[in-house]
Image (tube, rainbow, N blue to C red):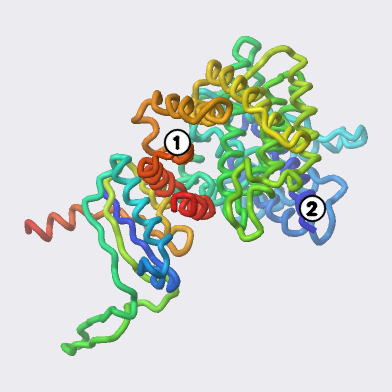
Amino acid sequence: MADARRTVEEVARSSYGRLLAYLSSQRRDADDAEDALSEALLAALESWPREGIPKQPDAWLLTVARHRLVDRARRTRVRAEQAPVLQELAAEPRDSATAGETFPDRRVELMFVCAHPAIDPALHAPLMLQTVLGLDAARIAQAFLVSPATMGQRLVRAKRKIREAGIPFRFPAAHELPQRLEAVLEAIYGAFGLGHDEAAGADAPGKDLVDEAIWLARVVRERMPDEPEVRGLLALMLFCNARREAATSPYGGYVPLLDQDVALWWADEIREAEGELSEAARSGRIGRFQLEAAIQSVHAERARTGRTDWAAIATFYDSLVALAPTLGARVAQAAAVAEASDPDAGLVMLDALDASLVTTYQPYWAVRAHLLRRLDRGSEAVAAYDRAIGLTQDPAVRRFLLDRRG
Amino acid sequence: MRYAILVYETPADFASRTPAENERYVAAWRAYHQALIAAGVRVPGGIALKEPATATTVRIKGGQRYVQDGPFAESKEQLGGFLFLECESLDVALEWAARCPTAATGVVEVRPVDLVMHETILNG
């Protein structure tokens, strides 16, 4: 049942994304068309689960959107000139429908527009979720922890900027591609991370965002199969997603990676992730996401070998930190070194981090508490646990840490 | 910016107040407060309130005083306390509100402090 619903959503959202990307690529003021398409998407999500997916989902969405536009034009008159945009658009696939073709897929170009350097990086992911997937501002706002009105305003402003600054709707040139692609992948991973954090709670509201992010990565991979980092990102997300179920106990408690029952990991996702990662490796161009995926691949090995090769993980973290010294990577590196050699070595690495950066970074305090506890530094461990407890937003993690703290 | 973080707790939250009843409740709040201070967020005030049943409401209507037992509004979540925070933006205040233990059980409201009103009352 849930799967059928998911299929409907996937078809509806990919149709929506293709249509909107195509509309935007025509460089018309597509605001009204976008509104009408959003309404059509809602109608599809409502009726398709009951009535089945239409043979030509794109045409279905277009027809509904066009009716909405005409209705609105009747009411407002001023916007009547918008209706021809969709009419014209709808006319095109009729010619190509016989060839089984629908619209040229410009969704990846749309993603490049959303993650353009002229747009505030904090809005890259929200813009993609709204334009490519048709998620509504309220849902996006929830994930990004701002009010729906605020998110709505920010999205409107960003779209105005896209129009007014004349951000081109095209594939980046070869010389700018690596950097531009990184921004796209970063935004997809950002959405995944938020969904992952949300999904950690017992009733898993962020599950949808996790799936959407994976799906966005698939869209990019289809279009750019030779970019190893795209596959690396996809592999990374699949590895992490494979552990979703195992990370929550039957009572809604948090289960850390090392305590997880490997039988609960999703073997299919892991297999697919391994495939993507080895395909990426053939290019010989290593990157941040491939390294992160490789680390998760070592963890996944535990399902086969029953043990975790910490030395291998620590080595991968060395390369990762050399390539992208983010705070998250450095904290995880310290944790890996602590497991591979001894807790003292990990603690030294944590101490080397800039104190002003870690004050609100919850994983730092959780790792620190764990290492101090292992070193029998009781009162310092309790103080670090308190910081980790006070900084988490996840009730399951809070309960887990409170129990550990004692 | 200065914000009030208004903490609306469920009856179960209120029942967890005594350390003997639920050590976790108290420990989570203490940790939250420590994390705020350690992060350099100024917390110029705030207080915990006793359970809603201890409230008494007063209003004057037509020259007559009406006094009632219990809180003003009848709803599942009731004001259990509040904190003032000084932080740079609503985004940051919301982040701290989400870390508040009650965000997972009740509701946490973030409201900007009305400094103009405050000054007017104090200084005429």
Residue B86 rendering spot, x and y as whole percentages? 27, 46
Residue B66 rendering spot, x and y as whole percentages? 23, 87
As drawn, the label of residue A65 is none
Question: Residue at point 58% right, 23% down?
Answer: A317
Question: Residue at point 70% right, 51% down?
Answer: A40
Residue A97 rendering spot, x and y as whole percentages? 88, 37
| Residue sticking out furthest to the right | A98
Q: Foreground: A56 or A349?
A: A349
Task: Confirm whether residue A36 shows in the render.
Answer: no
Q: Which chain letter goes with mark 1? A: A
Q: For the residue marked with disc 2, what is the amino acid?
A: Asp
Q: Considering only vertical position in the picture, is A287 above or below A255?
A: above
**For the residue carrying disc 2, how many other residues have a C-alpha within 10 Å: few (<14), some (14-19), or many (20+)?**
few
Q: Circle 2 is placed at which residue position?
A: A3
Q: Foreground: A217 or A16?
A: A217
Locate residue B45 relative to residue A24 in the image: left or right. Answer: left
Residue A341 rendering spot, x and y as whole percentages? 55, 25
Locate residue B28 relative to residue A323 in the image: left or right. Answer: left
- Nearer the N terminus, badge 1 or badge 2? 2
Q: Foreground: B69 or A327?
A: A327
Locate residue A148 relative to residue B110 in the image: left or right. Answer: right
Q: Circle 1 is placed at which residue position?
A: A375
Task: Confirm whether residue A69 shows in the render.
Answer: yes
| Residue sticking out furthest to the front | A376
Q: Considering only vertical position in the picture, is B95 above or below A229?
A: below
Look at the numbered disc 2 and give the secondary structure of its residue. helix
Q: Are marks 1 and 2 on the same chain?
A: yes
Q: For the residue marked with disc 1, what is the amino acid?
A: Leu
Question: Residue at point 42% right, 66% down?
Answer: B22
In three-dimensional space, the C-alpha distance between marks 1 and 2, rounded to whole angstroms, equals 47 Å
